[in-house]
Amino acid sequence: MRIEVNCSRNYPIIIEKGCLKDIKKYIDDNRRIMIISDDMVPQEYCDALKLQLNNCDVKIVKHGEGAKSFEIYEDCLRTLLKLNYSRHDLIIALGGGVVGDLAGFVASTYKRGIHFINIPTTTLAQIDSSIGGKVAINVDEIKNCVGAFYQPSLVLIDPEVLNTLSKRHYNNGLVEAIKAGLIGDEALFKLFEEDNLDIEQIIYRSLLVKKRVVEQDEKEEGIRKILNFGHTFGHAYESYYHLHDYYHGECVALGMMVVLDDEDIKKRLAKILHRLDIPTSCNANRNEILHLLLNDKKADHNMIDLVKVDKIGEAKIINMPIKELEKYI
Amino acid sequence: MRIEVNCSRNYPIIIEKGCLKDIKKYIDDNRRIMIISDDMVPQEYCDALKLQLNNCDVKIVKHGEGAKSFEIYEDCLRTLLKLNYSRHDLIIALGGGVVGDLAGFVASTYKRGIHFINIPTTTLAQIDSSIGGKVAINVDEIKNCVGAFYQPSLVLIDPEVLNTLSKRHYNNGLVEAIKAGLIGDEALFKLFEEDNLDIEQIIYRSLLVKKRVVEQDEKEEGIRKILNFGHTFGHAYESYYHLHDYYHGECVALGMMVVLDDEDIKKRLAKILHRLDIPTSCNANRNEILHLLLNDKKADHNMIDLVKVDKIGEAKIINMPIKELEKYI
């Protein structure tokens, strides 16, 4: 399957089982290639790429949000400089969202922009973070506050690599697909109510929702904010639990549950989440969550855009005083 | 005078004597504003801005290429974060090329891009570096190897601020205007053969040449390379002298002199340079210059694009083996 994304740079997303084993079909290796990956990505995937590609270098960073730091960012750039990479060479991100964000930001700024291909290896990254062009690092606790909008030249999705993920990690990523269904595609949402999950269709339809939104508003000046459905509270939960007790997708699930007003949708969502062993409520301290919401970086003069879904497949953005979020918890 | 630049983001350049004293005419200060400047820019210019604008913060960095480091870049970003600047706020660069490069790169990456206005205060920056969208920092000795193409929303040029520059500094910047004349505007070149230099016309016409080139090739994939006329050897001289004995413009002057084949143009250029007290030859060691040329970062597989001018106002790019540069020195 193939999706064409049309924005400041047009690029294809290819979804193909086993494509990692047939990489030369998609990537021209008549140039130097730096693979940036982390130590949680199974070695076999990196080895598979190295075996097939000429002129390949590999940079492995420590897994986790810590890799999105100034220090690692600078280290990657210095490695490229030392090896004398030119603007016409290539960086491949092989890993989850963290690797894509880091490698993408490195690519966007090395010699003012070098070619970049993203090969996401987690459900979360395949469904969501690998497209849209947002790349960034963190500063201390502040996520994604230094970065760029930088489009890859290709996103290559091999659903087979998901087989090595733990069940919890796998399901965690599916939350962004459920979200995509809720905000933009009822049929996608319904796929989660089937007996068997068709993962390829789920990835494909999720990316179509995101593509449609991103093409309209590449730099998040308006409509793109609907992708944040569930994330306002989700980010507060993430900060509260420091990503220890809950993963990103799990926090977004919690965040969607609290802002849904329609009881029927809420019930259907809860049923799907239960089946996937994803929590639908938590015991976070109400006052602390409220405090975190008040400090949301997307807030502007005490107002915030909250995304609401009252009908599956349709989202709306409501600008409201942050204080009013209180009623949801 | 006003020039509209049309590229990925359109923006105006305004050239107006005294505009620094009437800043509210050009800048909406209904937002927070961070002025980034250096300790060589006369205090009075920064004070003038602060007096006229609300919500103004100031970040002064140490002057010189050293300011274009990872360390200072990170420090600027942390300052913005600490003060809680939003994406809708503004960064103003007030200074020469170094300040513009640094502040522009900070602006391009802070929260994935914050508004940016450039107020260049040197001839070099007013004539050349303030437009074109190239922003960057250095890594050790490697200039501009980490950066972005990021267009400002406005460039504001007040020729009156040039009065506080030393004569040498002032003339140094004029070399880029002479270069602009040689590659793209014979009338501009001839302005330097008049009895009195019309600085406003010189700035205006130089920017028109650059605008024309940059609009055709924003990301330097082809024609934009003609702006490098004199810079291939110029950069080698810069490295050789570590910018101690000669300024950037002076090195470019030396670099233009060596690659001109036409004796008449060469004579006319030498006459202009003499009048401005700019050197036309130097005593650099031939072998060392050759060695530096071989390591030029713009070289690709031992080939290099050399810009040649055989007729005033017309440039051409010749791809040649680096070795052949030998014959010019």
Image: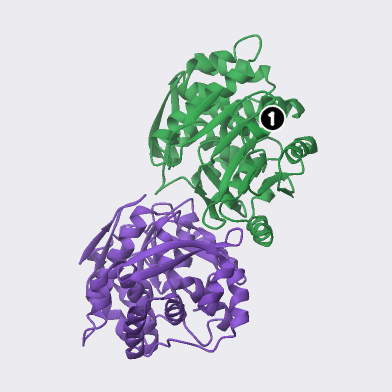
Chain colours: A green, B purple
Q: Position of residue A34 (x, y in %)?
A: 67, 48
- Label 1: chain letter: A
**Residue drawn at the location 36% of the way across and 73% of the way down:** B179
Q: Quadrant of the N terminus of chain A?
A: top right
Q: Position of residue B224 (x, y in %)?
A: 40, 59
The residue lying toward the viewer, choosing from B85 and A187, is: A187
**Residue drawn at the location 35% of the way across and 53% of the way down:** B216
The answer to whether residue A246 is left or right of residue A294 is: right
Quarter of the image where one finds residue B180: bottom left
Number of numbered callouts drawn: 1
**Residue drawn at the location 64% of the way across and 15% of the way down:** A197
**Residue drawn at the location 51% of the way across and 58% of the way down:** B81
Q: Tag 1: Cα neighbours inside 10 Å, few (<14), some, or many (≥20)?
A: few
Return the residue at label 1. A22
Tell me if residue B151 comes above or below residue B327 in the rendering: above
Q: Position of residue A20 (x, y in %)?
A: 69, 31
The residue lying toward the viewer, choosing from A210 and B193, is: B193
Circle 1: residue type? Asp
The answer to whether residue A239 is left or right of residue B87 is: right
Q: Position of residue B131 (x, y in %)?
A: 36, 64
The residue lying toward the viewer, choosing from B175 and B159, is: B175
Tell me if residue A299 comes above or below residue B122 in the rendering: above
Tell me if residue A94 comes above or below residue B148 in the rendering: above
